[in-house]
Image (tube, coloured by chain):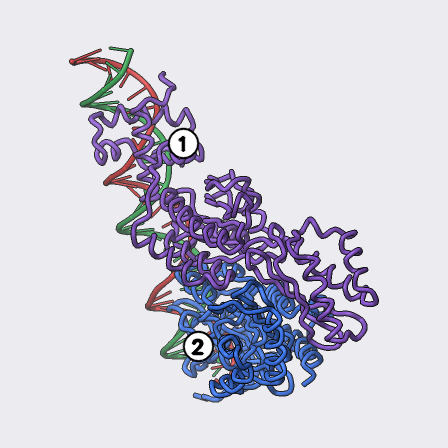
Chain colours: A blue, B purple, C red, D green
Amino acid sequence: MSMLLNDRKIKILEAIINDYIQTAEPIGSRTIAKKYDMGISSATIRNEMSDLEDMGFIVQPHASAGRIPTDKGYRFFVDSLMRRRELSDEEAQFLQSVIANNISQIDYMMQETAKAIAALTKCATIVSEPQVKKARIKKVQFVPVDERAFVMVLVTDTKVVKNHMVYVDRAVDPLALAGLSALMDSGLLGKSSEDITNDFAASMARLAGSDYDVALAALRCVSEVMKTEDDIQIYTSGIRNILSFPEFSDLEKAKAMFQALEEKDMLITLLGKSSNDKIQVLIGQENSLELLYDCSVIKASYSASGQNFGSIGIIGPKRMDYSQAVAVLGGILKHINAVLKAISGR
Amino acid sequence: MSMLLNDRKIKILEAIINDYIQTAEPIGSRTIAKKYDMGISSATIRNEMSDLEDMGFIVQPHASAGRIPTDKGYRFFVDSLMRRRELSDEEAQFLQSVIANNISQIDYMMQETAKAIAALTKCATIVSEPQVKKARIKKVQFVPVDERAFVMVLVTDTKVVKNHMVYVDRAVDPLALAGLSALMDSGLLGKSSEDITNDFAASMARLAGSDYDVALAALRCVSEVMKTEDDIQIYTSGIRNILSFPEFSDLEKAKAMFQALEEKDMLITLLGKSSNDKIQVLIGQENSLELLYDCSVIKASYSASGQNFGSIGIIGPKRMDYSQAVAVLGGILKHINAVLKAISGR
DNA sequence: GTTAGCACTCAATTGGGGCGAGTGCTAACA
DNA sequence: TGTTAGCACTCGCCCCAATTGAGTGCTAAC
């Protein structure tokens, strides 16, 4: 009754998981004995498998069927068994070119990143734009549109550009607005979202003298844009790939997936707070969305000098190709981090 | 052998289509006789149905099944039979509020419009942002970011705001850039995409004197932003609704739908050129995407003073509730057109 | 500790029979 | 001449029983 994961058990477990990842079919003792010749009989494998089931690594979907991995099984696989795969030359070059071709516009870069990952991994991919919340203000400028409206343009040190229309209830002279713009710009340089308190806004607005009201409206807009998490852009790609996995031919499951992936709030929750910049593998119920309990999520944040800016998530079935996904994610992160570092100068 | 659509045939056809829209099941002569009492026997209905089949309005999916409408049947239904439905008070008020709550930002308005339509019709909905291509320039301003980069901010008369990063290969003084910005702004006011030819750009850039190169780069960027159709934002919503329709429980069909709806190019093709501002109903193969031949598309453009700016499309199964979709689309169009007219002042 | 052998389980497949919704045709009727 | 009742026929669908086959657990022997 050796309830320890000895070498042989591990080999068998690995065979089961690898096979299941490939075929999506439960696998039995005889099949293992034939396919992976380990010099032991199916009966012996049966005994070992029984132990593995007792230990919670595998489970029978029904009697008289083979075994499939449990979440715990996948967890062990990912933590201890999986060989870290290197990217192939083509894959690496493809990712490289995607980033290189889109350096000038951060938003395109993120969209194309999502597309590229989805194409390589055949999984659904979501990418969040660098959060302005975490960034510092590089430039603020007000662009007059008509008498009572102007666009507040904000550029962060991560070169994310945000704009928002501001309406005021009296006519504002363009020249006065330009002066105000310069004033606010210099006052806001280098500030991050938490710096812009109500008090700070009020005291800054007072500098504007008779244009106090306009300044306050503008600052409120700046603060809102910097603080909201809702306004964050999230790019998705390859959601339809989900339908190609046999585990989602059950329409109810597929619907759950699509519901989660079509709602921004959900996606924001999903990407959530990745504490550090390691690549996280969340298997089954480990992720934060009940709708995605049948999936695995591989996610990571991109960052510059320890500060997280945004996140990337790859969503697939639990039997997804973890090693590839991790490799791809790692590869693209390296590039994005480099770009961000260069841009923000942090 | 009366091959004319007499009154009775029409009544039967209408019954078939209405029933099929509700139940998604083929419908037979006996059912019609019982459900809609028209004072004739099932045998007579059978004869009429046989004629209707010969005329191409209905078809049997297989022998010993009832009939379902063909594309031609739907076409006749939409053109001649369908009662134009009015929006219910709640529906009307809901649409009204969606627009009213999002007047200040055109992009939110479009996104929320898509959401609202999808919610009401239970169909997939796509909405394209007002095309800058069709708009006139209201304001152009360059916002310096660092020595060699600035953001070109462009506001159209439809209050769509676009921004694009411009990199130049030498340092540009912020003051000089501001002057340049003012110069370009005044020169570009009221211009539309076709006005900005290469010649025009060159002659305008010459006004910048020693900053000719910077001006040219900026103008090129303006021209690109104004001209590209790719950069158009397209908002989608309710794509997952598709999975709730029984006709798409065939995974292959569902996949086709998702493929079409996930690719921007496809969506642009689909919305295509709606020549006038009427609401178009495209049944089955009438639309321009082969992937959507199993669907119907209801689309229309929103416009101000005869100029189309963008489009809205509702995509559902061929047996969708056409009258509701048309009513909803008509309702929202009225509001959007009013907003656009007010904003652009055209 | 390993293995062969055997009894057992159970999902999936197969095939036949009946059901029912549907049609087309024909003959009779108004 | 149009309408209807009646009937034979078709065929998808459902249910059921039998069969198959992949898989297990247990036991006894090596």
Number of the label disc, if any, that sits on residue B76? 1
Q: Amino acid at mark 2?
A: Ser
Report x, y in % for residue B234: 54, 57
> Is residue C14 rendered to the left or right of residue A121?
left
- Residue annotated with mark 2: A288
Report x, y in % for residue C30: 16, 13
Number of the label disc, if any, that sits on residue B232? none
Relative height, residue A303 to residue B74 (above, below): below
Between C29 and A300, the one nearer to me in the picture: A300
Q: Numbered disc 1: what chain?
A: B
Depth check, mark 2 against mark 1: the one in front is: 1
Q: Amino acid at mark 1?
A: Phe
- Around disc 2, counting alpha carbons within 10 Å, would you say few (fewer than 14), some (14 to 19), or many (20 or more)? some
Report x, y in % for residue A88: 71, 70
Give the residue at x 53% y 77%: A211
> Is residue B63 rendered to the left or right of residue C27?
right
Check disc 2 and report its element: helix, strand or loop.
loop
Query: How many numbered marks are there?
Result: 2
Q: Quadrant of the N terminus of chain B?
A: top left
Check disc 1 and report its element: helix, strand or loop.
helix
Q: Residue furthest right?
A: B210
Give the residue at x 69% y 74%: B144
Give the residue at x 41% y 25%: B55
